[in-house]
Amino acid sequence: MALLSSVEIRKRLDEESNRKLVITPILDPDEQIHEGSVDVRLGTTFILTQKTEFPMMDPSAHVEELKEKIQRYQFRVSKRFHEEFILHPQQLVLGSTLEYLSFPSGVGGYVLSRSSWGRLGLIIATATFVNPGFKGCLTLELLNLGEVPLVLYPGIRVAQLVLHTVEGEPGLHKSRYQFATEPEFSRIYNDNELRFWGKGSVP
Amino acid sequence: MSSPAATLAYLKAAQIGEQGARLRLLSFPSTTPASLARLVSQVCEKLQDKILALARRGSSPDVERLLVFISIYLVDQVAPVLRFIEGATSENTPANLVLPLEKIGQALLPDSKFIVRRQWRYNYRVVELRETLESALQGLLSSKEREAIFGPPSERLFAISFPSFERDSALLHVNFAHEIGHPIEERFLKEEADRASLVDVEIRRDIEQELPRASSVDRALKVGEAKSYRRVAIQEIISDTLSAHVFGPSCLFALYEVGALSRSMDVVSRDLHPPWRYRLRQMLSVLEELGFIDKEQSTLKSWPQEVPTNVLQAKPKIDVWLQDLRAVVSQQTDLIEIEKEVQVRCAYRSVQKAIPSIRGFASRNVTTPYTPRLFGEEVPGLLDRIYMQLPPNQIEYTHRRVCPVRLASILASGWIYKIAELTSFNKENPEEYVTRMRGLNRLILKAIELSAVKADYDLAFARVKNGPSEQR
């Protein structure tokens, strides 16, 4: 496993094959492609939580019940470019990358906060690994850990993708969140094992 | 104490104004719906002032009549406009598509603004809103007062509605171009009005020849009906033709899909539109004339040979679809229906004569048309992206890199993929078809967003880059 340099990233983005690396669009390659990483931008859709609709989240609940609760718990907000989105201290919202990604089977990655934003308190991802073979827009978990509300705008560079090669024969990539073009809410209900560990199955 | 009519009118104005102010705060994909909400609130405020002034004047039958008129106007004309605003929120519309569509509308009708909104009825339609709001105010407000609210008289405002559950059916929304065409067709009818008497004479003479023994009253009735049939047919054919200039072959694909939902391809309606088969025949003929489709072979033209295999393999599938369509329009059953009644027959004879001038009119009015050359340059590369499950927002061949691409090309690539790969579902796994269609629509909508933002970014960045050098 080796980190991809900016030269290698550009080479793989320019490759002529179905197995090429795709990050589309890169609006400004000179600004976005760095040594070992690519800056990605904030998309236009956000998922917010509607706390008054939901007493608590128990992921081991019955699938259908949980699905419905999750639907009630979330609502989507779209912002135009140049329109502000305010993230308050301690608020967690889901956003997504503006860019659509397609990783070949030999490339994986990590999504990290950009340090300039991190210093203001903005954390952009907690589930940071991007599988080889992933296709879609990445859901970002935006959390303001700072003291003051942050004004975000769709299109700003909020995160960076660190890319690396993957060793060995690629397996078949399976993801719950494949081909997303907007943020996707948790599908924790597909995790069958939780039903075993939850309190409902105590003998 | 004010009269009951004044109290009622004042209350209605206040309530509707409040609704407008509340709706203005919702999230919209463009600024136009919020502007309309503001307009509604302004109209209501102005009327509240008017009602107060009338109430202070004291009660008289004339004043009471005027107050009742204001209440009726508020309830019948102003309040229904609120539903257009409510249906135009980002959540209710294909938000990525709204701004590009507004731009197309403004290119065709420069002084106009457009709202895209959902409706529960299953059709696309366009409604002019400014006239609805302003016309009844002529007796109440001076032209200066009206202009202060509505802007210069040349500014118009249209609401284009789409079927609610088709929100994400990006491909079907090429029908918007047809709806934008409707306000433009007024120009054709206006141009034609100069020789309207000629058309009248022609239809009258035709009816006289068909019904030599009918009374003059019967003949006059038939002439009236024939003119109605003609007008409706002309309106639809102009809009279809204009849309073909804007979006090319996608209009044919979408027209067929919408027409397939009708009970019959051959029904002639005096109020709605010509038979679907007739419209499809006309649309096919326009696309042949524009050079998108080969007339002899019924195949797509402008399809390069040096393209990836799956893109090359999609072409024959489209050609088969076009040949099937040719078989559909070759049937004359709609023309047999048209021939059945004298007034319909005479109307459509006149329509047929107007076709060359309709096509000339469409060419003159779409100043930057979508051409077969652009189609050939962009669509195969975009289709290749869809096959790779990527949004078709840019072309990335070694010899050719294009971004942004035209909206018409994005939609055409989606239609071609759909026709080549998603014509029917697998009976064993029908859900897979729904999932794949959903995926295709998502890719198309994403591509529209990405291509548009790239265009805007390049433009803005060029300005930033040029800024300092200009100063130097």
Image (spheres, helix red, strand yellow):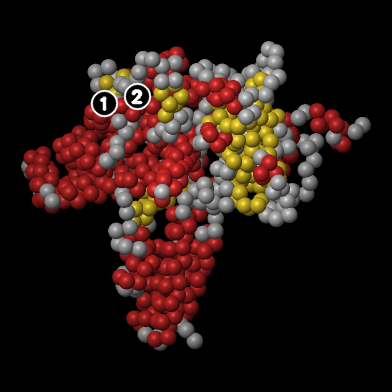
Judging depth in this view, the residue of A178 and A98 nearest the camera is A98
Q: Is residue A86 visible?
A: yes
* Picture residue at 49% right of the left edge, 48% below the top: B29
- Secondary structure beneath disc 1? loop
Q: Are marks 2 and 1 on the same chain?
A: yes
* Picture residue at 12% right of the left edge, 48% below the top: B195
Judging depth in this view, the residue of B32 and B398 nearest the camera is B398
* Picture residue at 48% right of the left edge, 57% below the top: B34
Q: Quadrant of residue B237?
A: top left
Amino acid residing under circle 1: Gly
Q: Nearer the viewer, mark 2 or mark 1?
A: 2
Q: Residue B302 in the image: state x and y as whole percent.
A: 31, 22
Query: Callout 1: 10 Å neighbours few (<14), some, many (20+)?
Result: some
Query: From the viewer's perspective, is residue B332 above or below residue B453?
Result: above
Q: Label 2 vs label 1: CA separation?
A: 11 Å
Image quarter hosting the N terminus of chain A: top right
Query: Callout 2: 10 Å neighbours few (<14), some, many (20+)?
Result: some
Q: Quadrant of residue A2?
A: top right
Image mark 2: chain: B
Indicate left or right for B33 with B65 as reference: right
Amino acid residing under circle 2: Gly
Instruction: Please give the label number shown on residue B376.
Output: 2
Image mark 1: chain: B
Residue annotated with mark 1 = B291
